[in-house]
């Protein structure tokens, strides 16, 4: 599919939203990407997973790891299409991520960290640290949408279906706040 077709899927499913949003990073934006909406229909989730898997196949991935909660569906779909194992870390009572539920990583295991959306890369860096701390070799980082400014996290390029350049603003310098637009905080860490 073309970039326009992927953008159409994001718009059609309501995954790409327009307004005044507070991101989980605390920054503000005029657009918000809620990939859960693009993954709501299993057929769309399978299509997105297959596309990301095709882009990761040359890396010969042994395992996909995705952070909770938003990236679990796309991570699982990518692993399913690659025919490899899938795992996810969970937040501890101190807020850090760690593998639980008996998930392990073999020394040197080739890992793809798969996200739904990457903006600042903070959670992605945490997942990379979990995987490498247990001896994994993170060979790929992928996302449905890359809205980072750098196109990379922790020195690893982001393989994405769509890269979006969406400006973000610190609250004190947000033109949307200055215009008096209502702020919505849709992130999974702040609201439903």
Image (cartoon, rainbow, N blue to C red):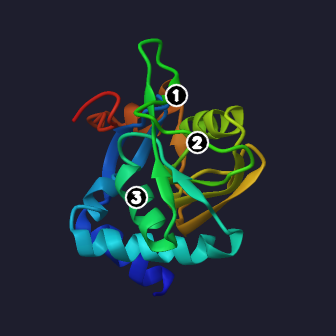
Q: Nearer the viewer, mark 1 or mark 2?
A: 1
Q: Secondary structure at mark 1?
A: strand
- The label shown at residue 98 is 1
Q: Secondary structure at mark 2?
A: helix
The answer to whether 95 appears left or right of 60 in the picture is left
- The label shown at residue 76 is 3
| Residue 33 appears in the picture as rendered | no
- Work out which quarter of the rendered image holds the C terminus and state it: top left
Q: Percent position (x, y) of residue 33? A: 38, 53
Q: Residues within 10 Å of mark 1 (few under 14, many from 20)?
A: some
Q: Percent position (x, y) of residue 43? A: 26, 75
| Residue position for label 2 | 124
The answer to whether 157 appears left or right of 3 in the picture is right
Q: Residue at x 49, y 33 (%)?
A: 27
Q: Residue at x 51, y 27 (%)?
A: 97
Q: Percent position (x, y) of residue 160? A: 56, 66
């Amino acid at each position: 599919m073309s970039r326009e077709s992927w953008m159409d899927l994001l718009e059609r499913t309501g995954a790409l939203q327009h307004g005044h949003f507070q991101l989980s990073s605390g920054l503000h934006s005029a657009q918000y990407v809620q990939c859960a909406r693009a993954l709501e229909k299993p057929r769309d989730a399978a299509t997105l997973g297959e596309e990301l898997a095709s882009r990761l196949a040359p890396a010969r991935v042994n395992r996909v790891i995705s952070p909770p909660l938003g990236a679990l569906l796309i991570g699982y779909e990518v692993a399913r299409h690659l025919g490899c194992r899938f795992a996810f870390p969970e937040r501890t009572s101190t807020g850090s991520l760690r593998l639980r539920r008996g998930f392990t990583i073999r020394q040197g295991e080739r890992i793809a960290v798969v996200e739904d959306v990457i903006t600042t890369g903070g959670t992605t860096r945490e997942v990379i640290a979990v995987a490498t701390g247990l001896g994994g070799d993170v060979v790929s980082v992928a996302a449905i949408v890359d809205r980072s400014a750098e196109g990379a996290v922790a020195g690893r390029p982001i393989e994405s279906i769509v890269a979006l350049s969406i400006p973000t603003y610190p609250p004190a310098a947000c033109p949307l706040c200055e215009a008096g637009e209502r702020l919505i905080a849709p992130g999974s860490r702040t609201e439903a």
